[in-house]
Image (cartoon, rainbow, N blue to C red):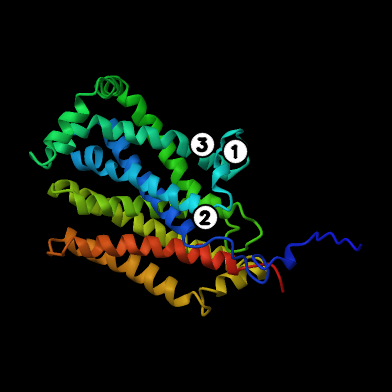
Amino acid sequence: MKEEIIVSGRLNDKIDPILSAWHSEIPIYLFLGGLAAGLLFFAALFFILGKEKEYSTSVKFAPFIAPLGISVGLIALLLDLTNPLYFWKLYTSFRIESPMSWGAWVLMFVTPLSMIWCLIYLKEFFGLFGEKFKKTSDLIFDIKIVNLTIEIAKKQQKVIAWILLLSSVILGVYTGILLSAFNARPLWNTSILGPLFLVSGFSTAAASIIWITKDHKEKILFSKIDLVLILVELFLIVHLFMGFLASSQAQIDAANLFLGGEFTISFWLFVVILGLILPAFLETLELKGFKIPVAIPVLLVLIGGLIFRFVMVEAGQVSNYIY
């Protein structure tokens, strides 16, 4: 009997000639994780600043999207796992050098805390719909444990806000570091991905708040915030490519995927022009008093943010060090 030991991944059809292990579930997970991180960050920040009443949508109501987004993202992640029933093994240890370990544990804390935050404002949330959900509201608030949880959470809300503020930043950065820690793919092998994904996630969150809020002052504030975040995002994208083009041949080749290569149109047209520059232009016009339908820049930012993650995940798997 002849035995062979394969010590290289070159014969694995999921690795060579391109990595094809991550599909649509991963960019969806990264998008929803970044969106949830941004919503929780703004909610915690404005609560700590004492702006709960002034910016009620960002503090009280927009965070209801966060636990839903995280839940859908985690379902997408589970669908991508080869052995989803073994996900619990991530929680049997904590490896400080592992981004996936950080992400798993941060999500363990953020998910229940986001639900508790929403629970504090649940009665006000139901109040937005008048008598439509009165029976549901009465049924929920007849449960003693719910009222006890709300009472304790309100007393400790500032502590919860500080924890959410920190953990939401970690969650937002993690969505980029999850890729950048994969050194075998030159497109992902850059420290800029963490801040870039963080800023992109916060931008989609700001856009969502602009869409939801009915308060003009809050809408103007988040238009300004989103405009700044878009400018920072463009700055990071420029430096991302400057870094690639000044690096090794493998990273130059990775950059060329976007500079005349197969991802040129999808990135520069749909992400940069339609997803960043155009909404920034429209938001600037709105700040100057022009009447712009709010859904247009918001949808452009959200769709652009989602396409950005699809492009980065797919292009990263195409880039390699093999010549």
Q: Residue at x 61, y 73 (%)?
A: 253
Dot 2 crowding, Cα within 10 Å, few <14, some 14–19, many 20+: some
Residue 193 point in image, percent of width and height: 51, 55
Amino acid type at mark 3:
Trp
Cα–Cα span, label 2 and label 3: 19 Å
Residue 317 point in image, percent of width and height: 58, 65
Q: Residue at x 14, y 39 (%)?
A: 133
Let me know if residue 88 appears in the view. Answer: yes
Give the quadrant of residue 168: top left
Give the quadrant of residue 120: top left
Q: Is residue 227 left or right of residue 87?
A: left
- Disc on res. 105: 3
Cα–Cα span, label 1 and label 2: 16 Å
Q: Residue at x 44, y 71 (%)?
A: 267
Relative to 64, is 137 above or below? above
Task: Check disc 1 and report the residue beneath it.
Answer: 89
- Check the image and name the residue furthest to the left: 131
Residue 91 point in image, percent of width and height: 56, 35
Report the mark closest to the observer, 1 or 3: 1
Q: Is label 2 in a helix, a strand or a loop?
A: helix
Q: Upstream in the sequence, badge 1 or badge 2?
A: 2
Q: Is residue 306 left or right of residue 291?
A: right
- Check the image and name the residue furthest to the bottom: 260
Amino acid type at mark 2:
Asp
Let me know if residue 55 appears in the view. Answer: no
Task: Check disc 2 and report the residue beneath it.
Answer: 80
Amino acid type at mark 1:
Lys
Nearest the viewer among 306 and 140 is 140
